Image (tube, rainbow, N blue to C red):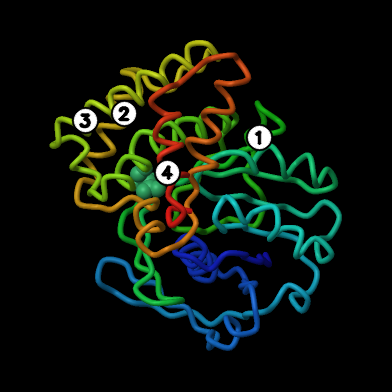
Amino acid sequence: MYWHILGAGAIGCLWAAQLCQAGHPVSLILRNPSRLDSFDGQLTLEHDGQCRSFQLAGCLADSCGPIDRLLLTTKAYDVVEALHGVAHQLRPGAQIVLLHNGMGPQQQVPELYPAQQVWSATSTDGAWLREPFHVVWAGRGETRIGRFDAPGEAQLPDGLDGLELQLLADPAIELSLWRKLAINCAINPLTALHGCRNGELLSTPQIHRQMQQVCAEIEQLCQQRQLKLFPDGVLAAAEQVARGTAANYSSMLQDRRNGRRTEIDYITGYLLDSARQLGLALPENERLFKQFNSKKTNR
Ligand code: KPL
């Protein structure tokens, strides 16, 4: 079944290739004419040292035709604007799947587009771009997909059959998004500010102490919100991810190093907003957030 994908980063390209491989036609909606010019209609998926190429259409929002199924894989801060850009092409009842780091748009989009069916997703697949439109699927993970606005519903969007990706219909997607948010809050700002690999959060005592404080505050918020995220607590879960990805640079550090805007407003910013609504102060997270925003180049 036909899919449009908006956001041709690593995850967007991974999904495009997976959908093509499963026999679903795909169009990549590209942001501007120069990006479209640079796309020769071929996407390469590299996995376990083997490359496979797929032919697919590229288009701009105005020429992509009617959309029945849309996967949005832009950065969190681009989601709403990107969606507005293709809104005129959405068929009534079209399926929209949001897949990005951070939180905010998952609640906003169903409110803005009540005529559409909106799913939110979170993934632990590891992927990176060797070059534009050549994606390396570096680590198999799982993708949980559910309706933020309809908790309890456990149905995947249609048109995802045959994918090699591990997909799980999640009736409690908000909780899963909070799990990912907590991990991102514990790892991303600290690695970005200290310019270190994920593993150095554990091996550098001063940074590890900060990580402990960040996690203790998240724990406090979760208690107030009655969110049970991890059986052994946020710190243990974040340490496990930092250990498992010890040699990696977090996405926030990479964004910062490449002079791109980061997703801090949708990660730590979302956490702080959520705490503020309950009258709760999270001083260490607040300090990191301010430190981030005080450096213009960080955003
Ligand atoms: O998602 C991540 C990121 O880098 O954005 C991990 C690897 C989990 C670190 O928070």
Residue linked to disc 3: 208
Residue at horizontal 35%, vertical 60%?
Answer: 257
Question: Label 2 neighbourhood size at 10 Å, few (<14), some (14-19), many (20+)?
Answer: some
Residue 2: percent from left, percent from top: 68, 67
Q: Dot 1: few (<14), some (14–19), or many (≥20) neighbours within 10 Å?
A: many
Asked whether the residues under the numbered discs 3 and 4 touch, taking CB atoms below 8 Å apart as contact, a structural biologist would say: no
Find the distance from the CA under tag 3 to the CA under tag 2.
14 Å
| Residue 141 seen from this side | no
Q: Amino acid at mark 2?
A: Ala
**Where does the image place residue 66, in percent across and percent down from the top left?**
80, 69
Q: Is residue 52 left or right of residue 210?
A: right
Q: Are marks 1 and 4 in contact (CB under 8 Å)?
A: no
Residue at image location 84% in from the left, 60% down from the top: 91
Report helix, strand or loop for mark 3.
Answer: helix
Query: Residue 52's quadrant in the figure?
Result: bottom left
Numbered badge on residue 237:
2
Q: Residue at x 78, y 39 (%)?
A: 111
| Residue 198 quadrant | top left
Query: Which amino acid is tagged 1?
Result: Phe
Residue 20, visible in the rendered structure: yes
Q: CA distance from mark 3 to mark 4?
A: 18 Å
- As measured in the structure, the alpha-carbon distance from the residue carrying label 2 to the one carrying label 1 is 23 Å
Q: Mark 3 or mark 4: which comes first in sequence? A: 3
Query: Pointer 1: what residue?
Result: 148
Closer-to-camera residue (163/299):
299
Disc 4 residue lies near ligand 1 with CB under 8 A: no
